[in-house]
Amino acid sequence: MRIHTAAAVFLSLAAGGSAQLATFEPSFPSPWAAGGPGWDEAYAKAKEFVSQLTLLEKVNLTTGTGNQADLCTGNTGSVPRLGFRHLCLQDGPVGVRYSKAIPFISSYVLRLRGEKRRRDLLCKGFLLIGICVRIADLNSVFPAGISAAATWSRSLLRRRGEAIGQEFGGKGKLKENPLRTPDIHLGPVVGPLGRDPAGGRNFEAFGPDPYLSGVAVAETVIGAQSAGVVASVKHYIVNEQEHFRGSISSNLDDKTMHEVYLWPFADAVRAGVGSVMCSYNKINNTYGCENSYVLNKLLKNELGFQGFVVSDWGAQHSNLASANAGLDMTMPGDGDYGGEYGSYWGGQLTESMLSQAVAQWRLDDMVIRIMAAFYKVGRDTKQVDINYSSWTLETEGYRYWAAKMGNTTVNQHVDVQADHGALIREMGAKATVLFKNVGKALPLVKPESIAVIGEDAQDNPDGPNGCVDRICNNGTLAMGWGSATAEYPYLIAPATALEKQAAADGTAFTNVKGNFDLDAARAAASEASVAIVFANANSGEGYTTLDGNFGDRNNLTLWKGGDELIQAVAEVNPNTVVVIHSVGPVLIDHIKTNPNVTAILWAGLPGQESGNSLVDVLYGVVNPQGRTPFTWGKEAKDWGVSILFNSTEPTPQQDFAEGAFIDYRYFDREDIEPSFEFGFGLSYTNFTYANLVATLQENATYTPATGETPAAQMYGRLDMDPNNALPPEGFEKIPKFIYPYVNDAAYPPPIDIDPPTHNRSAQPILPAGGPSGGNPDLYKIWFVVTADITNSGEVAGTEIPQLYISHGGPTEPKVVLRGFDEISLEPGEMKTVAFNVTYRDLSNWDVAAQDWRLTEYPKTVYVGASSRDLRLQQELTLPG
């Protein structure tokens, strides 16, 4: 009990010491899940299963077994008595991480990436003479979240999620076993949202607009879980920079929390997501994984989340505080390194149960939530033995990598790619944003000669996986760096695809592979009909530094002399096309205004089919439909926020003083002219808008939720004899493996119990509360808004009409996105687009009422082509 008493004192001191800092009111008890729409069948199965478990078995399912302790990125304990293997958690958002690259020496010379395939070599993709260099273990690399969002396509977002889920769900695919091994896919990402454009991990998510991110995360979750894996949406919440991510406190008010950062998580919960990952940072001076306000009140109570909360790797900082604040699973399990167990849970949680410092219903709720998510996606019919290792590329190796024990077959090299390359190519093309196109410079039609210039167009000389976790910027950029990476099966560089197209067209082709020989760049560009110059900007996770950037970008300029390279090329060629691969916005107004730059494209982070996707757009096979999911400013100060790069405080304080005014909302409020506004993107055709109609729907009402929850339930009777929580006699522990056993059966009397954390009586339902997403009336349709969209150009194309709403208040943003669609039109064709506007779309968060309310100010709806190209508008007449 020494551990428990110390934790209680620490919490008391922390509460006293942070009185002058930003705080949220604690919220106890931790809400217990009860099922609901889409969950009831899973909960029935979970209750039956959990009722059979012993205390040790329950603890085993909540606790990771340790870093690199078993085959997956994260591994829980198992229940051998019931034949239940451990749960396998695996990164990442763009594909299966740690599906290790395979080196292979071949006597064959195989041509470009995938044109010829030798499955018997287990060697697909990037090949040199006689050598196959580091290729993926037969999985795909999809466009990053920020590129996926740039498609503004619900169908593509759904298909991407489904394909990623299939690869996770199929990585165990053998002839006799058509399913995959990871149970929990660690993605998608809506935290960071993208408050600051320099944020290192912004590229993993879907951009700084809550509505667009909410749609994207919901479609991704639905797609992934339809393939039979649990999605774990992350990082919850306001984890907006990499510097000091493990200690910084992100401080914000309740209104900003609801209207900006919580919004997309609510959409994920409404979509039925099985897991939410809590973040490293503090929120108003309490760590995310022990923050009862954000976990208990917001997520589990108000949003009615029925799945489980898992910690980010190493983000748990306590035993009791995290258990009672709503954490359900700790990963990777290691922690409290000075303690008796090397974990905050495992044996320490068992001690807490035996001393009754944690209530049985709380432990039962943890396990019920975990198993309900498991059953919800059908893992009970799809779980198979794990057939790959995250820690070695060899076929044979240690199962228990940290302990260097259990030598066996760990990698079976299963191909799960199916036809996903075609989807990746399509998505990469449709995510490409055309910013400038003077004199119909694009699409290209068999130009006489082209010069491809810049390192970003080239192959990485060390191979596409030549840098661990992509921590380099060599060759073309198609994903950022960090844990949100995967091994490429191949990577089509733009120069490769352009050379192939040039050969087919009889176009003379020149390729300048570097950025710094400006004389060579000028010489090549001056002789070409069109010069295509490439540049990029990278970022990633803050566990390492690249080119002086510790995850977050130090500035918003192009990397490796990209600006100078573009300037040199444009000086000598009046038909210069600029292609940018980047993790977010860069400062390009000087490029936009250069008269010799005839076209600018942002190709984002397109994944393995990068070059093919780009060629499809450059040559008009795909008419660009990409729209920028963030604003491009002219100066770094235009966004009104900045990364906190320096602090000497143990808990650096980052105040979100801008409130809801991030990205285009800030630009609008301050009347700042951007280079390119949120939602902007050109097409090879033109579209006209007409006939806006807003129709009020019947039963347009909202009723705050009332009533009470049922009381907390307990499942099965636990053996509370400490002697039975000791390891079995003769049991040999695997070194560095976390177990649920206690070290000593002798305990002092239990410490005083804090009544709120143990209160299992019925609890009041919050006004905005309800199952899976909050009060169902929030999603009731109040208006249907229609508009006619016509293709007034000469070629077929896809328009992305966008709906914005003004809430009318003097302290509210001028407009906020509340709808979009994807409309494909032949020349001269007209279609009517319809948007459903919900009560949630029209309302604002009322801090006093703790509910969504319509304000007294007039509401106006706009439909247009971007946040600043609002072509149609109408004031809405609200009922009553």
Image (cartoon, helix red, strand yellow):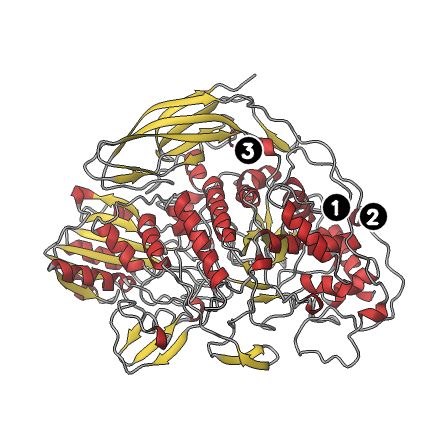
Pick the front one: 734 or 729? 729
Q: Amino acid at mark 2?
A: Pro
At label 1, counting other C-alpha atoms closer than 10 Å, the crowd grade (few under 14, some 14-19, many 20 or more) is some
Q: Is residue 222 left or right of residue 501?
A: right
**Earlier residue among tags 2 and 1:** 1
Res. 541 visible in picture:
no
- Label 1 near label 2: C-beta < 8 Å? no
Q: Is residue 403 left or right of residue 101?
A: right
Using the numbered discs, state the Cα–Cα distance from disc 3 to disc 2 in whole angstroms.
36 Å
Pick the front one: 154 or 628? 154
Q: Position of residue 635 (x, y in %)?
A: 37, 47
Using the numbered discs, state the Cα–Cα distance from disc 3 to disc 1 in whole angstroms.
27 Å
- Label 2 near label 3: C-beta < 8 Å? no
**Earlier residue among tags 3 and 2:** 2
**Earlier residue among tags 3 and 1:** 1
Residue at the right extreme?
749
Q: Position of residue 704 (x, y in %)?
A: 65, 29
Q: Which mark is residue 618?
A: none
Using the numbered discs, state the Cα–Cα distance from disc 2 to disc 1 in whole angstroms.
9 Å
Q: Which residue is mark 1?
A: 28
Q: Amino acid at mark 3?
A: Tyr
Q: Which mark is residue 755?
A: 2
Q: Quadrant of the C terminus?
A: top right
Q: Is residue 254 above or below residue 360?
A: above
- Label 1 near label 3: C-beta < 8 Å? no
Q: Which residue is mark 3?
A: 779
Q: Amino acid at mark 1?
A: Phe
Residue at the top extreme?
880
